[in-house]
Image (tube, grey):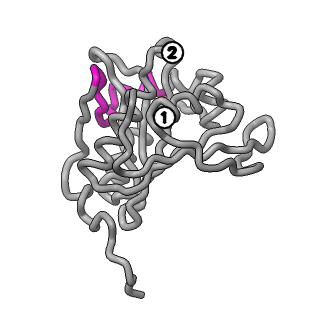
Amino acid sequence: MPSLVEAVVPPGTLGEVAQPVIRSEGLVLRPWAESDIPVLVGAYQDPDIQRWHLRMMTAGEALVWVHSWTGRWASEIACDWAVEIEGKVHGRIGLRLKLGEGFGEVGYWVLPAARGQGVAPKALAALSEWAFDEVGLHRLELQHSTQNVSSCRVAEKADYLLESTRRSSLLHVDGWHDMHVHVRIAGAAAAV
């Protein structure tokens, strides 16, 4: 059935080019590589990453995960980057995409040794600028448990406004959590 509204970002905008490396403020956002498997396995052993991302990962699963991003990028449904500083992975950031709607949903984590150093807000700001300026998305949002105070601060530092609270929205290991929804619209300036 034809849409009465033109796609915000036309099909083929991303899938026909290589996933970019994004550089900003000493950070490098780059596609995942097989050499990152030990970092991924270690990250998903961290209790905080497990708590908020509800995942564990073996080396075999990490290998499949790393290779899955090529297809997701080509299909224009999602993209994910390793967040690197001076050649060392400090975290991850990614987007689930609905290009036709001009929409992306952000997810991220930072390794324990890099927390409190501004890595997540800087990565979020860099990814947001790329998504708005290079891709042409209109709206980005992120969700986190209302109990995840650190993620709330990350969103605020990258000018993601708190839009709503979704009550009893996501099942965690310890039960149902309310989720904050933070939003940034194209044209809003990041102040990291």
Q: Outermost residue, bottom direction?
A: 1
Q: Is residue 185 left or right of residue 6?
A: right
Left or right, residue 150 beside residue 167: left
Instruction: Write the start and end of the magenta stretch as one range.
Output: 25-40
Which quadrant of the view contains residue 117? top left
Please indicate whether residue 54 sits to the left or right of residue 112 in the image.
Answer: right
Could you tell me which secondary element the residue under label 1 belongs to? Answer: strand
Residue named by callout 2: 116
* Residue at horizontal 60 percent and vertical 36 percent from the top: 53
Q: Please tell me whether residue 87 is drawn above or below residue 182 in the rendered image.
A: above
In magenta stretch: residue 107: no
As drawn, the residue found furthest toward the left would be: 17
What residue sits 64% from the left and 43% below the top?
180
Q: Nearer the viewer, residue 99 or 121?
A: 121
Q: Nearer the viewer, residue 161 or 144?
A: 161
* Residue 1 place in picture, x, y as percent: 42, 87
Q: Residue 96, image x and y in percent?
A: 45, 51
Mark toward the start of the polypeptide (1 vs 2): 1
